[in-house]
Image (cartoon, helix red, strand yellow):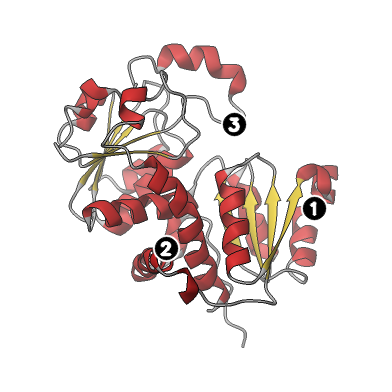
């Protein structure tokens, strides 16, 4: 009997011990790239309905360094943009490529792809979750501060896909998560309730940042929310991560941002370009952690 296909739609799809192993492996490959498993006959399919810089480059470079190949498709390049059923495309593409990374809007599209695919599906970002970024973030924290278990993390801003993935990470990596959002921009209630033992939602960013070992934020208006930009600028005006907010965190607190960042909006230049910021390591780690993830999914 064939083994079930492993997918990576959220952090919860991979056992806790295996996630730790992927992050450890990512750091090993960062230090010694020649240790990577060679996969010369493997092909990664990339289907992106949303634009990308870091995600696409990280996946393509990772696959190249594994001696494999990648194939990039946008909605306009494929029949998906012309209404072909997801079920049909999943069946066809999974007979031609070895793994698919999909960057899309509705998380349900990923779930449908995974249901009908015979190869692993990776969530390269959806409106609900961004698990690949969390692998890179956690790798950066482990590299700079060691184990994140028992630490306090402050999420400042929108209760978005990144916030949701941080909630899942709090559960799997055993840290406390304080989320500060303006009213009306809170994360999914059911997800918060399911992790109430380690997640709290407050309206005061200073309260969330108090004593935090890691402070994280994201843009105030994500892709697809451009029409809301002006309203969001007003709603989030008190939620900038600046030096005054970082001063409330632990003295050795780190700052992270998944990028691209808007200096003067969600974060001040003083913070993102300052000594607490590890955003460039975090960004580089996208390639290393995705390489380790590809190894994991393709060698099971």
Label 1, secondary structure: give it: loop
Dot 3 alpha-carbon crowd within 10 angstroms: few under 14, some 14 to 19, many 20 or more: few
Q: In the rendered image of this protein, does residue 57 appear above or below residue 35?
A: above
Question: In the image shown, does 197 or 159 lie closer to the viewer?
Answer: 159
Quadrant (top left, top right, bottom left, bottom right) of the N terminus: bottom right
Q: Which residue is mark 2?
A: 30
Which residue sits at x=38%, y=28%? 157
Dot 1 alpha-carbon crowd within 10 angstroms: few under 14, some 14 to 19, many 20 or more: few
**What is the CA distance from the residue labelled 3 to the residue labelled 2?**
30 Å
Tell me residue 106's x, y (percent).
Answer: 62, 42
Q: Are marks 1 and 3 in contact (CB under 8 Å)?
A: no
Q: In the rendered image of this protein, does residue 198 appear above or below residue 275?
A: below
Q: Which residue is mark 3?
A: 223
Quarter holding residue 237: top left
Tell me residue 74's x, y (percent).
Answer: 75, 46
**What is the CA distance from the residue labelled 1 to the residue labelled 3?**
24 Å
The reply, left or right, for residue 4 in relation to residue 148 is right
Q: Which mark is residue 85?
A: 1
Which residue sits at x=80%, y=52%? 85
Question: In the image shown, does 259 or 212 lie closer to the viewer?
Answer: 259
Residue 237 in view, yes or no: yes
């Amino acid at each position: 009997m064939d083994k079930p296909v492993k997918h990576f739609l959220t952090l919860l799809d991979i056992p806790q011990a295996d996630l730790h192993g992927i992050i450890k492996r990512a750091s090993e490959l960062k230090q010694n790239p020649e240790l990577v498993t060679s996969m010369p006959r493997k092909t990664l399919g990339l289907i992106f309905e949303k634009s990308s810089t870091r995600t696409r480059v990280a996946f393509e470079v990772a696959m190249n360094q594994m001696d494999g190949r990648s194939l990039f498709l946008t909605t306009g390049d494929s029949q998906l943009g012309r209404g072909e059923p997801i079920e049909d495309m999943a069946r066809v593409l999974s007979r031609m490529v070895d793994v698919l990374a999909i960057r899309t809007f509705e998380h349900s599209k990923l779930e449908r792809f995974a249901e009908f695919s015979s190869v692993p599906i990776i969530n390269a970002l959806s409106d609900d979750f961004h698990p690949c970024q969390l692998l890179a973030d956690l790798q950066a924290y482990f590299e700079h501060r060691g184990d994140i278990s028992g630490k306090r993390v402050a999420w400042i801003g929108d209760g978005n896909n990144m916030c949701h993935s941080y909630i899942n990470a709090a559960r799997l990596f055993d840290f406390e998560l304080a989320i500060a959002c303006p009213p009306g921009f809170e994360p999914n209630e059911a997800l918060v309730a399911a992790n109430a033992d380690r997640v709290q939602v407050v309206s005061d960013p200073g309260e969330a940042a108090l004593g935090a070992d890691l402070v994280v934020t994201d843009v105030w208006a994500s892709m697809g929310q451009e029409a809301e930009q002006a309203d969001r600028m007003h709603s989030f005006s008190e939620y900038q991560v600046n030096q005054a907010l970082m001063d409330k965190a632990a003295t050795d607190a780190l700052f992270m941002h998944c990028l691209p960042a808007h200096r003067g909006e969600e974060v001040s230049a003083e913070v993102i370009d300052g000594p607490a910021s590890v955003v460039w390591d975090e960004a580089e780690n996208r390639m290393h952690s995705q390489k380790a993830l590809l190894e994991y999914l393709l060698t099971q």
